[in-house]
Image (cartoon, rainbow, N blue to C red):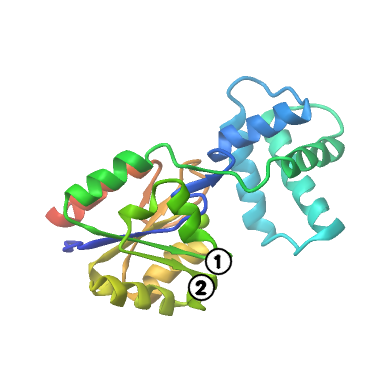
Amino acid sequence: MRARVRAVTLDAGSTLIHWCAPPAERFELLCRRAGIPLPAGAGVEAARAGLRFQRRYGAPPGGGAEARAWWAAVNAESLRAAGVDGDLAVLGQRIHAAAQGVGAAFVPDPDVPAVLEALRTRGLALAVVSNWDGDLAPRLGAMGLARHFAFIADSTVVGVAKPDPAIDHLTCRSIGVPPESCLHVGDRPETDVAVALAAGAIPVLYDPLEAWDGPEVRVTRLLDLLGVLDGLETGDPA
Ligand SMILES: [Mg+2]
């Protein structure tokens, strides 16, 4: 496929920014906080298993005991994949309890400073399209990231959420680029790939853990977007 890409829109959570740390490091960190030793290098396998579990069993319940049990089960699945022995249900609960002390701390994806700079140097317009709870713009501002974006679509602020293509369309109107010239990158097939396809934009799945199976164009790190863009320009597959 040959396409003239004029803009890149990015998902926020688990794409641009990560709660606490990128997924594998986060699981290792939460295990340390919970006092659970992990085999060396097991974080990736553990995080991948947790993500696949989440996809298999859908979104977590809204809150309370049901949500605690759901997250404990996700953690137990991760521990199993990491080769940890013991009462995994109880250890999963301990990790969930440890996570409660972390708070709403987000960090940029490690590739973010370099990739945003490179995309801007190429003359591409940048925007964020995110299902978020209303404070995304100030949060990105506090992290020094907001200045890169011509528009930040926080679903709670704009009143429409992915995968409804309306959120992509209003973003495209705001930055003055038609959807077919926009590449959207995000970590969830059911929201990010779906919204891009529904809106007529070009989807790229960010899959750092190589957790998903599917036909989508995917990158395992954000800097690989540059190669995808080169491929789209020349018509060569990335
Ligand atoms: Mg996301």
Query: Looking at the rendering, in which quadrant would you find the N terminus?
Result: bottom left
Q: Is residue 200 above or below residue 75?
A: below
Disc 2 and disc 1 in contact, CB within 8 angstroms: yes
Hey, what amino acid is under mark 2?
Answer: Val
Query: Quick one: label 1, few (<14), some, or many (20+) residues within 10 Å?
Result: some
**Pick the front one: 144 or 155:** 144
- At a point 38% along the width and 73% down the height, the residue shown is 168
Q: Which circle's residue, 2 or 1, is located before the other in the chain?
A: 1
Q: Quadrant of residue 194?
A: bottom left
Is there any visible trace of residue 238 in the rendered image?
Answer: no
Specify the amino acid type for callout 1: Gly
User: In the structure shown, which secondary structural element does the residue marked by tag 2 occupy?
Assistant: helix
Check the image and name the residue furthest to the left. 234
Q: CA distance from mark 2 to mark 1?
A: 5 Å
The label shown at residue 117 is: none
Left or right of 177, for residue 160: right
Classify 231 as above or below 46: below
Q: Which residue is mark 1?
A: 134
Residue drawn 53% across and 45% down? Answer: 18
- Residue at horizontal 61 percent and vertical 48 percent from the top: 51
Q: Position of residue 129 (x, y in %)?
A: 42, 64
Residue 21 in sight: yes
**Which image quarter: residue 221?**
top left
Mark 2 = which residue? 157
Q: Residue at x 16, y 61 (%)?
A: 2
Neighbours of disc 2 within 10 Å: few (<14), some (14-19), many (20+): some
Measured from the top left, where is residue 38 in percent x and y? 69, 24
